[in-house]
Image (spheres, rainbow, N blue to C red):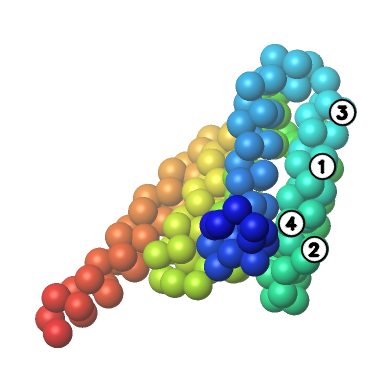
């Protein structure tokens, strides 16, 4: 980027990547303040909703597909963040981890929805699915833990076949 050009005109600038970065930093911020967020669920929800709202800002000037993807995923994440207080967890002190997983799952959803190549789509889908598997495993009881582990193993096998399949096709050609 030269001194006179703007970053928004650069082909390397993608609003979806900025939204993903904001969501990941929000999850990191939530985990940094775990003691405060585990005592006060309202603070946890406020930080999560603020992060989701802030992730919408870079996509406001993007094309319609990116804008729809980021808005839709942020809306779903906001609904999930509002439901964090009513989650029946094995340990009530795990609420900040659930909030961070919602933000990381939203980042994976944005990466998957705005992917331009197979590797970006695979990484976004894997981030989204592993966040969901871990959230399932954190729910109270033995059955959710078992299903979370099964979902985790199934996701790992499907991701390996998704990545190895095109590699084998390329190798055979």
Name the residue carrying label 2: 60
Dots 4, 3 in contact, CB < 8 A = no
Which residue was labeled with disc 4? 58
Q: Residues within 10 Å of mark 1 (few under 14, many from 20)?
A: many
User: In the rendering, at what x and y percent does residue 72 appear?
Assistant: 76, 64
Chain-order first, disc 1 or disc 3? 3
Q: Are marks 1 and 4 in contact (CB under 8 Å)?
A: no
Count of numbered badges drawn on the protein = 4
User: Secondary structure beneath disc 1?
Assistant: helix
Determine the secondary structure under disc 3.
helix
Q: Residues within 10 Å of mark 3 (few under 14, many from 20)?
A: some
Q: Secondary structure at mark 2?
A: helix
Element type at mark 4: helix
Judged left or right of residue 73, residue 16 is: left
Q: Residue 89 location, x and y as percent?
A: 67, 31
The alpha-carbon separation of the residues under discs 4 and 3 comes to 26 Å
Q: From where the camera sits, is residue 135 visible? A: yes
Quote the CA–CA distance across marks 2 and 1. 17 Å
Cα distance in 3D space between marks 2 and 4: 6 Å
Residue 136 visible? The answer is no
Where does label 3 land, which residue? 42
* Residue 120 coordinates in the image, percent (x, y): 46, 63
Asked whether disc 3 touches disc 2, contact meaning CB atoms under 8 Å apart, the reply is: no
- Location of mark 1 (residue): 49
Residue under the point 82% across and 48% down: 53
Q: Tell me residue 115's x, y (percent).
A: 53, 68
Q: Are marks 2 and 4 in contact (CB under 8 Å)?
A: yes
């Amino acid at each position: 980027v030269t001194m006179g050009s703007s970053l928004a005109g650069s082909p390397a600038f993608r609003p979806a990547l900025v939204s993903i970065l904001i969501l990941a930093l929000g999850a990191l911020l939530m985990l940094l303040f775990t003691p405060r967020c585990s005592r006060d669920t309202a603070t946890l929800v406020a930080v999560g909703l603020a992060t989701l709202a802030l992730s919408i800002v870079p996509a406001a000037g993007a094309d319609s597909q990116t804008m729809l993807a980021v808005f839709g995923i942020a809306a779903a994440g906001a609904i999930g963040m509002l439901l964090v207080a009513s989650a029946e967890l094995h340990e009530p002190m795990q609420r900040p981890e659930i909030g961070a997983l919602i933000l990381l799952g939203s980042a994976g959803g944005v990466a998957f929805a705005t992917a331009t190549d197979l590797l970006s789509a695979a990484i976004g889908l894997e981030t989204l699915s592993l966040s969901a598997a871990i959230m399932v495993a954190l729910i109270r009881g033995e059955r959710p833990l078992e299903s979370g582990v099964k979902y985790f193993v199934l996701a790992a096998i499907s991701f390996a076949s998704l990545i190895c399949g095109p590699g084998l096709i390329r190798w055979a050609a």
